[in-house]
Amino acid sequence: MAPKSRAKAGAGAGKGKAGRKQLVRPRRDAGLPLLPIVVASILGVLVVVMIGFIVYYNRPSSPPQKVAGIPCDQLEHSQVHYHAGLQIVYHGVLTNVRDNAGIQTDSAGKVTCYYWLHVHAQEKNVIHIESPASQTFSLGQFFDVWNAWSTSNGFGRQRLDANHVATFTLSGDDRMIVYVDLGDGKGPTVYTGDPRAIVLKQHEVITIEVTPPDVNPPPAFTFPSGL
């Protein structure tokens, strides 16, 4: 009987080994690759940063502050639109108002806004008065706009007072003489008040002379066709 018992035991032992389940060890490379994840994360951050820069540098710029009560608007107004001429004569030499005075541009040269009082490059010394409603404007207000525009663009101060006309400073025997021609057929007449108080009117021509010499009558002024 003993041999049978050992045989059964041997058979049972063999059966037990065969019936055991082998443990499955996870493969070390079974997870997601790390390098592609890192690269994708870096690219994602770069894209977000680039979008941020694009949005920041293309954001609408705030318009300049009002000058002498005159704002700088994105578009020119047509509700009220007329023109006055301004001539500056320094020691007998006619000096033009700087082109585009009162017209703000960006670094690419694109117009960003127009002050209600401004000058176009193609129409020398013509002040465009363009506002959304009827209002009285003075020569002093134009000089204030011109000065703000000029200093912000690095062209220097443009003043109008007892001792200054645009960039010129009166000294020694210099004297300021102001002529106003209302276009009524009377021709230019001497203005003895504060030139800053001169009201801008349609086809009025204002001539400011720093003498000597006294250029009398002042140079003729012709408005461009269509103005």
Image: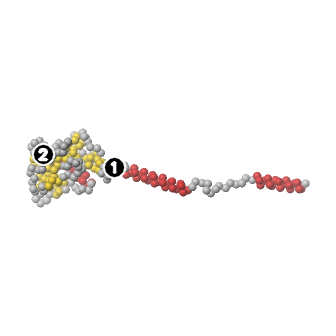
Residue 152 percent across, percent down from the top left? 27, 54
Amino acid under disc 2: Asp
Q: Quadrant of residue 200?
A: top left
For residue 61, the mark is 1
Q: As rendered, which of 109 and 65 lies closer to the eye? A: 109
Image quarter in which the C terminus is found:
top left
User: Which residue lies at the image location 27% right of the left edge and 46% below the top edge?
Assistant: 114
Residue labelled with disc 2: 181
User: Which residue lies at the image location 77% right of the left edge and 55% below the top edge?
Assistant: 17
Per the image, label 1 sits on a secondary structure element best described as loop
Q: Quadrant of residue 33?
A: bottom right
For residue 160, the mark is none
- Report the Cα–Cα distance between label 2 and label 1: 40 Å
Residue 40 percent across, percent down from the top left? 51, 54
Indicate which disc, 2 or 1, sits on the residue closer to the N terminus: 1
User: Which residue lies at the image location 90% right of the left edge and 54% below the top edge?
Assistant: 1
